[in-house]
Image (cartoon, grey):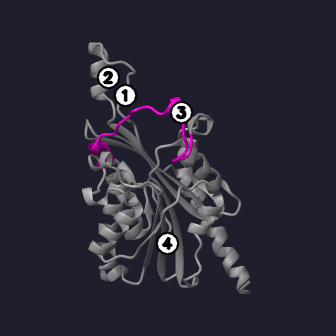
Amino acid sequence: MQNFIRLRGKQSCVYYKIVIVGTGGNGSHFIRNLCQITRTFKDTEKYKNNLVDITIVDADRVEAKNLNNQIFASDDIGDFKVEALAERYGEHYGLHIKNATEYVKEEAMLYKLFKVDEVNQDDYQVIPILVAMVDNNKSRQLFHRFFYSENVEDLIYLDAGIDGIVHFEKDRLSPEQKIERELSGFSGQIVLGLKWGGKVILPPITEVFPSILQDTRTAFPGESCGELVLNNPQRVMTNQYAAQLATGYINNLYQNQWIFTNSITFNAQFIGARPTFLTNEQVQRFKEVVEKRELETITNKGVI
């Protein structure tokens, strides 16, 4: 049987606390997908008592150039992306989508976004999910610190990244360079990091691709990179593919709180994806954390 982790605890219901950072090519498609499956999920009798809390975060405004590969309309130009998406898809699917028109640059903001105080955690198991739809390693470095913070006990950190089209700084290209450009911009990866009971069960993207932490030339959105900024456009098919695969992770969490894979690499041109399934060691590590938590709960209630 395929290895898997199931996050479901002893509580009767689940509260999904989902924070999505980034509303560009990957993010806008993902948010639309997420709203649709959330509506379907909430309308299913089996899951009607579960709660879903969605917040989307980004300070970008819609520009005309975004209309090609992002889900925006011409009348959105000039509006904050998060507000346009929250209004359109929240209204269409009957969901209350929270939004914050800021860039996430500090851990303090992440703690604020993940604050949970409106549910009884004896009745609801809280599953916090950070969805990173960003295109810079500075943000990923921040998310890495948040993920590994001793103040964060439980967290799913889901990251979607894609390659841009290869950029050459000259007008006339060789035949080989033209082919390289035409074959580029189709690849990407989805990585799910899991921290549970204060223990890292599945490594986040910064451990799967450690070069992210070594990137000193990166900058937060809205900060100038000077000559580092290159024209690396994204392909809409790649954005859609990344969003669909990331949505699959959320769908599994909605249905049975299941996690089957730590990561997926894909190529939208070849229409293929390769998952990295959970190892026996990862599943065993999770079981040990759950058993320890259950024992601590029993002890704290004075049963033993």
Q: Residue at the location (27% across, 60% down)?
A: 75
Q: Who comes first in sequence, dot 1 or dot 2?
A: 1
Q: Who comes first in sequence, dot 3 or dot 1?
A: 1
The spot of residue 231 in percent (x, y) is 39, 33
Q: Quadrant of the N terminus?
A: bottom left
Q: Residue at the location (57% across, 41% down)?
A: 219
Q: For the residue labelled by badge 2, is the local secondary structure a helix, a strand or a loop?
A: helix
The part of the image, by quadrant, that contains residue 266 is top left
- Contact check, label 1 and label 2, Cβ < 8 Å: yes
For this rendering, which residue is in front, 187 or 123? Answer: 187
* Mark number, residue 166: 1
As drawn, 42 above or below 217: below
**Which residue has dot 3 on it?**
226
- Distance between the Cα atoms at labels 2 and 4? 46 Å
- Contact check, label 4 and label 1, Cβ < 8 Å: no
Q: Who comes first in sequence, dot 2 or dot 3?
A: 2
- Distance between the Cα atoms at labels 4 and 1? 43 Å
Q: Residues within 10 Å of mark 4 (few under 14, many from 20)?
A: some
As drawn, 203 above or below 121: above
Q: Who comes first in sequence, dot 4 or dot 1?
A: 4
**Which residue has dot 4 on it?**
8
- Of badges 2 and 4, the one in the foreground is 2
- Distance between the Cα atoms at labels 1 and 2? 7 Å
